[in-house]
Amino acid sequence: MHQVLKQLLKRIFQFLGSLFLLGCLFLLLALVLSSIPVNKSFAQTDTSDVQIFVTDNGVHTDIVVPVRTALLDWRTRLPLDQYADADSSYTHVGFGWGDRRFYMKTPEWKDLRPGVFVTALFWPTRSAMHVHYVPRPLTVNKYQRPVQLSQEQYRQLVAFLQQSFQQQDGEFILIPGAGYSGEDNFYEAHGRFYILRNCNNWTNRGLKEAGVKTAFWAPIPYAIMRHLR
């Protein structure tokens, strides 16, 4: 019995050691590959047509855009009647892509469950788009970085955002009753989520599509935000 327990503990420690090494390798790759910029010729100017924001909560990044521009009024795609507490005075709308189950089960970090976390990391899972209306323009700080885009660059970003949603009869597919508040909702999304293709990679792809200087690969927020200073 003692020998069996000893072998079991040995295998547990070997497993934990392997996870630790994989985690270190992941972070090393993230730091190295995020230091390689793409769209290096991109330059922001005060005269650019559209200002967007990239936000960072320490783990997850979102893309925040004006509700209405000459190109698109997002209220035509995301009707306010789907949002109990948002109204026509709201100035911006934020977009995030991520693991569907993780989103639904984890409104706050205190709600995180190990099974949900492990599945989201290591198994390709269904995704969802999280949309939240923002009542006023964001304040510029290290967690909320502005990016100035031309009309054409913004057009590319809008195309990327819209293509991230699953659609039926030309409408985004709302997931009923899944929002955290009256200002946000979830919609069915394209793509499978896993550690190498996560929410931050999605944000990074959107910036690439818009021609913004960003990282070659960006699985963590720092990899994106470092290029937006």
Image (cartoon, rainbow, N blue to C red):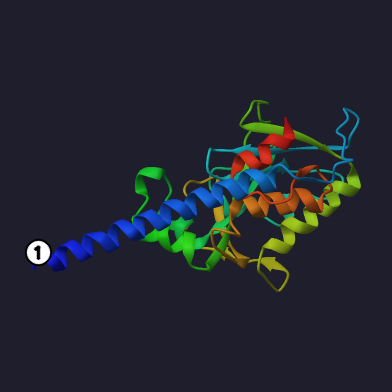
Can residue 87 be seen from the camera position used here?
A: no
Residue lying furthest left: 1
In-image side of 108 versus 142 (left or right): left
Residue drawn at (54%, 58%) of the image: 195
Residue 190 percent location from the top left of the image: 64, 67
Residue drawn at (37%, 50%) of the image: 112
Q: Is residue 184 above or below residue 122?
A: above
- In front of the other: 34 or 221: 34
In-image side of 215 versus 211 (left or right): left
Residue drawn at (9%, 64%) of the image: 2
Residue 73 percent location from the top left of the image: 77, 49
Q: Is residue 170 above or below residue 208?
A: below
Residue 56 percent location from the top left of the image: 59, 38
Can residue 226 be seen from the camera position used here?
A: yes
Residue drawn at (33%, 59%) of the image: 14
Residue lying furthest bottom: 169
- Quadrant showing the C terminus: top right
Query: What element does badge 1 sit on?
Result: helix
- In front of the other: 55 or 36: 36
Question: Which residue carries the number 1 mark?
Answer: 2
The picture quadrant where one finds residue 57 is top right
- Quadrant showing the N terminus: bottom left
Label 1 is placed on what type of residue? His
Packing grade of label 1 (10 A; few <14, some 14-19, many >=20) is few
- In front of the other: 123 or 68: 123
The picture quadrant where one finds residue 151 is top right
